[in-house]
Image: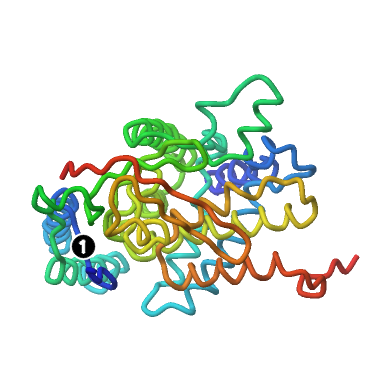
């Protein structure tokens, strides 16, 4: 039992780690990794229900573990290798979508993958073999898109991120939403999710205030 | 204009990867206990791979005189808002934007297909428009 307790305590640290993309953009009280994970799991389950032949249980499990390596690896962003120290330049950079050559992308992805894999092996090391292997297999599927569930969840993860960015932008119109708009047009390939992000665009950019969710407090 | 939709496109590298996984699964499957949970998952994957390997179309470089046009398998250098980026257009199964491989079914991938160097591609929605200028097209398959 102690092994489970240790694992849950470590995984619970995600409740306190703020997502780097928001911290870099100086969002007040930014979302934590655990908060992001919660909605990825919820979206993965409900959106998968609209697709044929997707295993929702596999998707939910994958969602729950997709970022647990970040307890030790941290939340690595595509901007990390080009972050300027100067605040003015940083602000400018955060308004753009980071661009690299294919060889630079491969190098950065490999470095990130290595760091996250080591962290994942460490955090799962005390779990019994069957559970450990299941978590490692699910994470590799999410990373490499081996199955249709892995490919779907990878995109749902980005949809959640886009929705959060739109919510920040709605609260503060100075929030730089452009990088998310651009990324969405390059990375999404699932027809259902492409329709979904078009609907998100329409909802958040409509002038009718009553189309936005109300704050009940 | 070629219609690429709803077909399984693989590069040689992707095909080799799937064949290797298929062989591995064949061996693993025989070692599983009947009715075990892992056997169910293995069989699901086995079925998926069988369909892929039966129905795929191989991505090949077009003949030299057509290599100035973006086709599947092309590595395209583009300029966007003064920045340069590079994409290789592949089928959905091999797409991995963090490695530079974007799907022919993504809005940008789809829009780049059948265009040539020097041309501008416009991606727009009701709120924003962005221009991708094609600088260079290579085939490194």
Helix, strand or loop at label 1? It is strand
Q: Position of residue B23 (x, y in %)?
A: 11, 57
Q: Position of residue B136 (x, y in %)?
A: 29, 40
The way the protein has been coloured in the rendering is rainbow
* Relative depth, front residue between A105 and A16: A105
* Relative depth, front residue between B77 and A100: B77
Q: Relative to B129, does residue A109 appear above or below in the rendering?
A: above
What is the total number of numbered labels drawn onto the structure image? 1
Q: Quadrant of residue A154?
A: bottom left
Q: Is residue B58 left or right of residue A16?
A: left
Residue density around tag 1, few if under 14, some if 14–19, many if 20 or more, within 10 Å: many
For disc 1, the chain is B
Q: Relative to B42, does residue B72 appear above or below in the rendering?
A: above
Q: Relative to A167, does residue A215 appear above or below in the rendering?
A: below
* Relative depth, front residue between B106 and A29: B106
Q: Identify the residue position indicated by label 1 in the image.
A: B9
Q: Position of residue A58 (x, y in %)?
A: 42, 65
* Relative depth, front residue between B75 and A194: B75
Q: Quadrant of residue B105?
A: bottom left
Picture residue at 85% right of the left edge, 66% below the top? A215
Q: Quadrant of the C terminus of chain A?
A: bottom right
Q: Is residue A98 left or right of residue A107?
A: right
In the orientation shown, which residue stands out farthest toward the right? A217
Q: Position of residue B103 (x, y in %)?
A: 34, 57
In the orientation shown, which residue stands out farthest toward the left? B63
In the orientation shown, which residue stands out farthest toward the top? A85
Picture residue at 28% right of the left edge, 51% below the top? B116
């Amino acid at each position: 039992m102690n092994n489970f307790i240790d694992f849950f305590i470590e995984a619970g640290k995600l409740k306190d780690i703020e997502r780097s993309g928001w911290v870099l953009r100086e969002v007040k009280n930014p979302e934590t990794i655990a908060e992001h994970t919660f909605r990825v799991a919820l979206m993965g389950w409900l959106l998968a229900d609209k697709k044929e032949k997707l295993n929702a249980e596999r998707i939910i499990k994958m969602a729950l573990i997709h970022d647990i390596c970040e307890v030790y690896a941290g939340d690595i962003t595509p901007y990390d290798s080009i972050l300027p120290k100067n605040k003015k330049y940083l602000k400018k950079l955060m308004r753009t979508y980071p661009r690299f050559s294919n060889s630079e992308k491969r190098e950065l992805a490999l470095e990130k993958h290595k760091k996250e894999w080591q962290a994942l092996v460490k955090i799962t090391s005390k779990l019994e073999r069957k559970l450990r292997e299941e978590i490692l297999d699910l994470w590799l599927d999410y990373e490499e898109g081996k199955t249709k569930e892995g490919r779907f969840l990878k995109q749902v993860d980005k949809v959640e991120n886009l929705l959060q960015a739109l919510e920040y932008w709605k609260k503060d119109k100075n929030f730089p939403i452009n990088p998310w708009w651009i990324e969405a047009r390059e990375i999404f390939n699932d027809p259902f999710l492409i329709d979904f992000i078009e609907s998100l665009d329409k909802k958040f950019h409509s002038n009718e205030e009553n189309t936005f969710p109300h704050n009940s407090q | 204009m070629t219609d690429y939709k709803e077909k399984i496109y693989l590069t040689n590298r992707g095909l080799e990867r799937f064949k290797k996984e298929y062989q591995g699964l064949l061996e693993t499957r025989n070692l599983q206990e009947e009715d075990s949970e892992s056997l169910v998952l293995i069989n699901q994957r086995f079925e998926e791979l069988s369909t892929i390997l039966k129905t795929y179309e191989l991505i090949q470089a077009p003949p030299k005189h057509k290599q100035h046009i973006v086709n599947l398998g092309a590595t395209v250098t583009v300029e966007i808002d003064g920045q340069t980026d590079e994409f290789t257009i592949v089928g959905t199964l091999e797409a991995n934007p963090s490695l530079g491989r974007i799907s022919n079914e993504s809005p940008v991938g789809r829009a780049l297909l059948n265009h040539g160097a020097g041309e501008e591609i416009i991606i727009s929605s009701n709120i924003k428009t962005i221009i991708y200028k094609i600088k260079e097209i290579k085939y490194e398959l």
